[in-house]
Structures are given as structure tokens and as C-alpha cells.
Image (cartoon, helix red, strand yellow):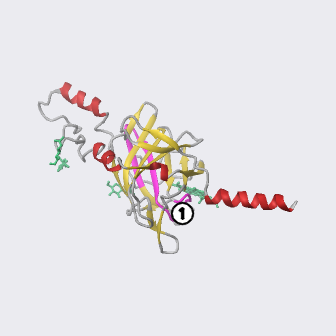
Amino acid sequence: MKWLSIATVTAGLAGSAAAQAESVPYTDAETGIAFQSYPSADGVEFRVALPATIEAGKPYDVILQVEAPKSLGWIGWAWAGQMTYNPLTIIWANGDQVMHSSRMAFGYSSPTAYPDATYQILKGTGVKGDTLKFTALCKGCSSWTDFTGEPFTVDASQEARFAYAFSANPVAAPADNGTTFTIHDGVGHWYHDLPGAKSASFADWVAKNTVGANGTAPGMNGTAVLSATRPRGAPFRFMERVRRDLGVDARNRA
Ligand code: HEM
Ligand SMILES: *[C@@H]1O[C@H](CO)[C@@H](O)[C@H](O)[C@H]1NC(C)=O
Ligand SMILES: *[C@@H]1O[C@H](CO)[C@@H](O)[C@H](O)[C@H]1NC(C)=O
Ligand SMILES: *[C@@H]1O[C@H](CO)[C@@H](O)[C@H](O)[C@H]1NC(C)=O
């Protein structure tokens, strides 16, 4: 049955060259951002939006969004689909806040802080009911120095293999993004459609969903109308309306 084994090998090769993407288009109503979203079997969704133009081998920004049950102790996203030597985005809920921590693992042990990936929190970050949602612009999630010391960039012209991990156990110090935590209860791998995640609206989405350090609303040009402490005398109902219209909760900033 020689032909059969050849057919099998060929199918295997075709599979690895052009893997079947497991992400689907998803538009987040709160931000208007059109993502490619991977709905994992563990109830966590991992989403990516990219700029329309990405030069091969050059670092690029990503908008990521993670939606998950807030009851999870932590959720991790591994940007090269493995535990070690790639940026890890770790997320958990701390009461009403969504915490994030940038890590890298250099072995199968607790990952350490990784300062070369930075996150700008966007609107669409907070806890509602039983769900946490984290939305951010990441610089440094798509390129880094690999195991051999060479620069590595996630190829945005094809599907990318990502990985996730999660634990039901809370992190040791939920209010501290440098906290330690214990090993996962589960891990998973998937192929994400990156060409399908590209959009000419990328910069617009970032601008429209930018929130200031003190809760400044998008488009407000520095007026901290959404600061956690209402300015003296600010009309309460106006504040409520702005919060509602923007869907921004001033407490939900990591
Ligand atoms: C205290 C923290 C952690 C410990 C102690 C730990 C430990 C381990 C161990 C022992 C394995 C099995 C290795 C093997 O099968 O040979 C593993 C696999 C894995 N871990 Fe972790 N881990 C931790 C955190 C994380 C985090 C934050 C992520 C982020 C996504 C992650 C992602 C993975 C993945 C994807 C695998 C599968 C093997 C691979 O693709 O590398 N782990 N981990
Ligand atoms: C924790 O947050 C601070 C302030 O935003 C940031 O500078 C630091 O890099 C973060 N640490 C980790 C491990 O993500
Ligand atoms: C935020 O508030 C702090 C304390 O009131 C202030 O020092 C800082 O300049 C403010 N930052 C912005 C971006 O408004
Ligand atoms: C904010 O400021 C910029 C530049 O100063 C301006 O182009 C923009 O229209 C302003 N936006 C609002 C909402 O005032």
C-alpha cells in the first residue's frame, strides 16, 4: 500500500504548510474592533487584530483581547505556542479589576517578569458579571529574542501557532502584577488566522479606544472626566452618562 503512505505523508506536509486556522471573525460590540477570535474548549476566547500593513521580519503592534470566566486563577497566552522563550501575557481578575502581567519562562517553572512586551490598556477591559475582558495594544508580543539569541518575529502572512494555559488556583497576590502563581490545570494550542486579523482601521481602533492613565475618556483630550474620584461639583448624572456611553469603568484599569 505504498500509494497510501505517500498520500498520508503529503497530507501531513500540506497540513503543516497551511494549517487550518481555528479562529473566526468576531467584532467586539464594546470597542467596535473586528478580531480573529479563537474560542478555546476551556471557555476562554483569545482575540487578535493587526495593522493592514506588516513588513516581513519587522516588529508590529497587536491589539489583543481575552474574554474569560473571572473565576479562573489566571490565564496565559504564549505568543509562539510554547511555554518557554516567548512572551507570555498573563491575566486575572482582582475584584473588579483586570490585572495583566508580562512574563517569560526560561524553563518549565514559574515565569519571570518580561519588560520587553508592554501593554496599553484599551476600553473593553473590565469585569462584568462572571466575565473578565482584557483589551490592550501590545508592543513586543509579536517579536522577541529566541532561544538561540536571534531576533524572532511572528509571521503575520500566515496562520500562527499560539498556546494558552490556565489555572483554577488564584495567584498568590492578586493585586500585584509581579505575583507568583502555581502550575496550570490545562494547556492548549491553536492556529490563529493572522492575515484575516489585519485591518486598515487598526490605528483608528486604538485611538477611539484609548483610555488615559486616570480614566480619561477617548476623545476628551486630557480632561479626566472619568477619574475614579469625581471632580468636586461635577454633575453626577453627566458622569454616569459618559460612563455608560463609553462603556468605561474607571476602576477597571490595571
Ligand atoms: C508556575 C508556573 C508554571 C509552571 C510550574 C509550569 C510547568 C509546566 C510543566 C512542568 C510543563 C510540562 C512540560 C512537559 O510536558 O515536558 C508545562 C507545559 C506547558 N506550559 Fe507551563 N508552567 C507554568 C506556567 C505556564 C504559563 C504561564 C504558560 C502560559 C501560556 C504555560 C504554558 C505551557 C504550555 C503551552 C505547555 C505545553 C508544552 C509547551 O508547549 O511548551 N505554562 N508547564
Ligand atoms: C507591572 O506594572 C507596572 C506598571 O504598569 C509595569 O511597569 C511592570 O512592567 C509590570 N510588571 C509585569 C511583570 O508585568
Ligand atoms: C493622573 O493623576 C495624577 C495624580 O492626581 C497626576 O499626577 C498625573 O499627572 C495624572 N496623569 C494624567 C495623564 O492626567
Ligand atoms: C483632540 O485634540 C486633537 C489635536 O489637538 C484634535 O485634532 C481633536 O479633534 C481633539 N478631539 C476632541 C474630541 O476635542
Q: Which residue is mark 1?
A: 84
Seen as rendered, the residue at the extreme bottom is: 149
Tell me where the magenta segment starts and ends, as one range: 80-101
- Nearest the viewer among 167 and 131 is 131
Q: Position of residue 100 (x, y in %)?
A: 40, 50
Q: Is residue 203 above or below residue 56?
A: above
Q: Residue at x 32, y 47 (%)?
A: 206
Q: Residue at x 32, y 33 (%)?
A: 247
- Nearest the viewer among 177 and 144 is 144
Q: Is residue 12 above or below residue 93?
A: below
- Nearest the viewer among 149 and 127 is 149
- Residue 84 falls within the magenta-colored stretch: yes
User: Can the viewer see residue 172 in this picture?
Assistant: no
Seen as rendered, the residue at the extreme right is: 1
Seen as rendered, the residue at the extreme left is: 233
Quarter placement of the N terminus: bottom right
Q: Is residue 99 left or right of residue 88?
A: left
User: Where on the picture, by quarter, is residue 115?
Assistant: bottom left
- Nearest the viewer among 81 and 176 is 81
Q: Is residue 199 above or below residue 115?
A: above
Seen as rendered, the residue at the extreme front is: 3
Number of numbered discs: 1
Q: Position of residue 55 (x, y in %)?
A: 41, 63
Q: Residue at x 52, y 50 (%)?
A: 193
Q: Position of residue 6 (x, y in %)?
A: 79, 62
Q: Quadrant of ligand 2?
A: bottom left
Q: Is residue 129 left or right of residue 238?
A: right
Disc 1 within 8 angstroms of ligand 1 (CB): yes
**How dense is the environment of label 1, judged by Cα within 10 Å: few (below 14), some, or many (20 and up)?**
some
* Amino acid marked by disc 1: Thr
- Residue 71 falls within the magenta-colored stretch: no
